[in-house]
Image (cartoon, rainbow, N blue to C red):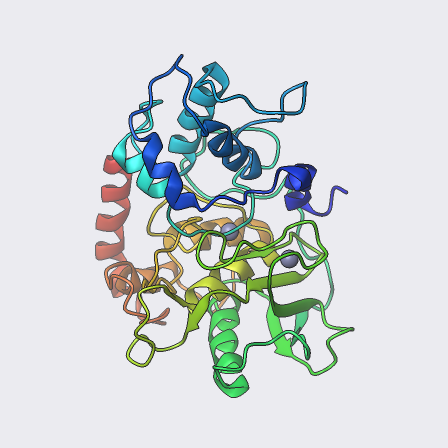
Amino acid sequence: MPDEGVTVITTTDKHNVTVTWREFTRFLDAGKGSQVSGISELKKYFNHFGYLSIPGNDSFTDVFDNELESAVVQYQQKLGLQVTGKLDTDTISTIVSPRCGVSDSPLKMHTTKHFTYFEGTPRWEKQPANLTYAFSPNNMINYLSLSDIREVFQRSFSRWASVIPLNFTEINDYESADIKIGFYGGDHGDGQPFDGVLGVLAHAFSPDNGKFHLDAAETWSIDFGKEKSNEAIDLESVATHEIGHVLGLGHTPVKEAVMYPNLSPRMKKVDLKIDDVEGIQQLYGANPNFKMSSLSESENSSNMGVGLKFTSPSKWPSLLVVVVLILLLS
Ligand SMILES: [Zn+2]
Ligand SMILES: [Zn+2]
């Protein structure tokens, strides 16, 4: 199934991650070589997200072995953490934070410091370049209005459409839509069961599958002013991230980027960053109306949901500063 990059992790069906990730905090500073009760669950987690393969005898042991250490190293590289090979505080707190369900690395483990693609670099080839999307009539949530949800997705799609020569149109006919969006709970038939509150938030499949699923168990929010829950997840941030997958982007280790796998509760991250834009433009080309210089403003706007702005090229100097900073920091 080369057209579904994330299906790589469906081989773990019988090893579903059922423990609450928060329990992994007890593995803080666990030492290599030792027997650590329950650490096989952490191995399943790493297996689920593409860092460990299932052993020959089909079951993970509770030994902190070499394979686990190298999984930790790869995870730290992929998540932009300091590479120590140890279950240090930063690493554990990243492991337990809510995230996207898409595997970080289908098969091969490239150590890139930027955007990635699915195995085989699939993209939408449809011409004209107009993709349709629709909401599943039977799989929506009722505490947010459909019109509010539609606006969220319209904004999310338009962010991507502003940087590449691709259009998105909402249609009513769910069956014929290219991109099929819905909220699902638990096992919902695609081999990627959702896990309840927090943990995995959503997943989407690579081109040209079009499946876009959100975990119905989350407390989805459009406005943190109205939704006070400590576990509230910003729908627009997740929508923008998953559209990146629908279009063919994998995860990036760049923490500020939309395609970073983790998103904390009550965090809003909707503006495409340079890494996101470069990744998607290498796949589809650039929208002629888009100027990379317009990113400088949102790059400095710390997730306030400003969105991309079409500004004059006078912003180049500040963009250069940002680029130089990124180069220095990388
Ligand atoms: Zn993702
Ligand atoms: Zn699904």
Image quadrant containing the N terminus: top right
Answer with left or right where residue 187 lies relative to residue 156.
Answer: right
Depth check: 330 or 77 in front? Answer: 77
Quadrant of image for the C terminus: top left
Indicate whether 72 appears above or below 273: above
* Residue 271: percent from left, percent from top: 37, 64
* Ligand 2 lies in quarter: bottom right
The image shows residue 132, relative to residue 61, as above or below, that is below
Residue at (74%, 65%) from the top-left corner? Answer: 127
Work out whether 173 lies above or below 99: below
| Residue drawn 57% across the image and 55% down it | 194
- Could you tell whether 140 is left or right of 159 in the image? right
Residue 285 in which image quadrant: bottom right
Residue 6 or residue 270, whichever sits in front? 6
Q: Residue at x 56, y 38 (%)?
A: 48
Q: Quadrant of residue 14?
A: top right
Q: Is residue 152 above or below residue 208?
A: below
Counting labels gives: 0
Determine the residue located farthest toward the top in the rendered image: 33
Residue 311, percent across and down? Answer: 32, 71
Q: Residue furthest front?
A: 37
Residue 9 in view: yes
Residue at the image point whose x is 47% and y is 44% from the top: 115
Q: Nearer the viewer, residue 288 or 165?
A: 165
Whole-percent x, y for residue 74 in the image: 44, 28
Judge left or right: residue 33 versus residue 174. Answer: left
